[in-house]
Image (cartoon, rainbow, N blue to C red):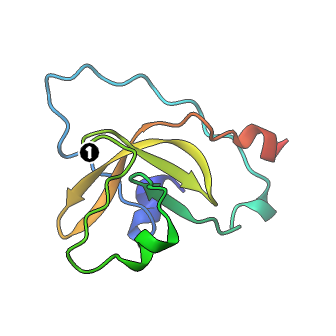
Amino acid sequence: MNLNDQFAGGDILIDDEHLDDAEAPAPAPKAAPRLPQMMRRIPVTLTLEVGSARISLQELMAIGPDSVLPLDAMAGEPLVIKVNGAAIGRAEVVVAGEQYGLKVIDLDGLNLDLIAS
């Protein structure tokens, strides 16, 4: 099952409608590692991290509806993709219809070879 098939079940959204025809074709992705059958259905939590801020408890208690907290990331930077809290790559947010999705830019830390071996 590929990522687009998973979206049909409501899990992952891949949006390639917005690719510019002038872009050079992306290199072919590496073949996905084969996972043992028993590992294929293990649930993981995929999150996108915009940035973070380190604040005191006093500052936390002062947060209200109009509060603005600066984050450690610059506007326009790719978001960090995390699986179960571990960073595995970077992505940008895309809109497809009425849903948000993510467009993967790179996957640096996704090393399923270690899991599958």
**In the shown orientation, is residue 49 left or right of residue 36?**
left
Q: Position of residue 94 (x, y in %)?
A: 25, 53
Determine whether 42 is above or below 91 in the image: below
The residue sitting at 59% across, 34% down in the picture is 31
For the residue labelled by badge 1, is the local secondary structure a helix, a strand or a loop?
loop
- Is 36 left or right of 29, judged from the image as shown? right
The residue located at (85%, 41%) in the rendering is: 117
Residue under circle 1? 16
Q: Quadrant of the N terminus?
A: bottom right
Q: Position of residue 56 (x, y in %)?
A: 50, 65
Kindly tell me whether residue 18 is visible in this rendering. Answer: yes
- Say few, some or many: other residues with alpha carbon within 10 Å of mark 1 (under 14 / 14 to 19 / 20 or more): few
> Is residue 9 at least partly visible in the picture?
no
* x 36%, y 51%: residue: 71
Q: How many marks?
A: 1
11 in relation to 92, above or below = below
Residue 100 placement (x, y as % from top left): 28, 63
Relative side of 106 to 38, left or right = left
**Quadrant position of residue 27:** top left
Q: Amino acid at mark 1?
A: Asp
Location of residue 79 with respect to 105 vertically, above or below: below
Residue 68 vs residue 77, the one in the foreground: 68
Residue at the far front: name it: 58
> Could you tell me which residue is drawn at 25 percent across and 19 percent down?
24
